[in-house]
Amino acid sequence: MTKEELIELLRDLKENKSKLKIRLKNLKNKRLELKNCEDIETSLTTSYGINQDIHSKNKVSNKVLQKIEHNNTKKTQIKEEIKELEKEVRELREKVDLAEDRIEALKYRERKLLEAYYIEGRTYEDIGNNVYFTLFSQTRDKDTIKRIVDRAVQKMLKL
């Protein structure tokens, strides 16, 4: 993995987590929808009309066939959507897990500063004055923060 790919993973981590949650909810809903399609009963009705008791036709209405065909097309469509969602969920999960596993290898200070810079999109100066101060009651200049973040990225690349 190159440094650019790693940085891209870190920058997209928050967005990918959100997408993953949304896709998982969509996948769950589609599976429920598929289950509901399979549970639908179709009832047979005969087609009697006004004064049809004289010439009783006793034929099965076409509504049953239409309902069965509609259910089958709906099932195949939902199954295709589920396959696409599962593929997308796998890809997103790989990206999220890859980034999170590498972040876990860092020490607390490195992790917080790296997350603030790449994931939250803060500047080195802001991190040195606000984040570092919040964490350790001290301030650091932007060069020191940059050096810590660069070391953390290099550490992640070695994994």
Image (cartoon, rainbow, N blue to C red):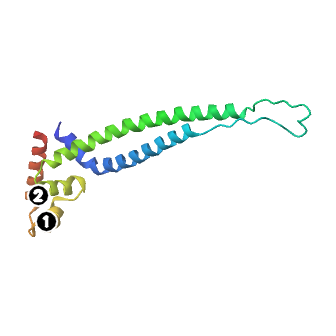
Please give the label number shown on residue 109: 2
Tag 1 residue: 135
How dense is the environment of label 1, judged by Cα within 10 Å: few (below 14), some, or many (20 and up)?
few
Instruction: Identify the residue shown where x is 12% and y is 50%.
Output: 106
| Image vertical order of residue 148 relative to residue 127, above or below | above
Q: Position of residue 5 (x, y in %)?
A: 22, 40
Q: Residue at x 55, y 37 (%)?
A: 38
Q: Quadrant of residue 48?
A: top right
Q: Mark 1 near mark 2, Cβ–Cβ under 8 Å?
A: yes
On screen, residue 30 versus residue 135, left or right, reads right
Callout 2 secondary element: helix
Please tell me which residue is depicted at 19% across the width and 44% down the height of the picture: 101
The CA span between labels 1 and 2 is 8 Å
Q: Secondary structure at mark 1?
A: helix
Q: Is residue 78 left or right of residue 121?
A: right
**Residue 47: % across, % down:** 80, 35
Disc 2 residue type? Answer: Arg
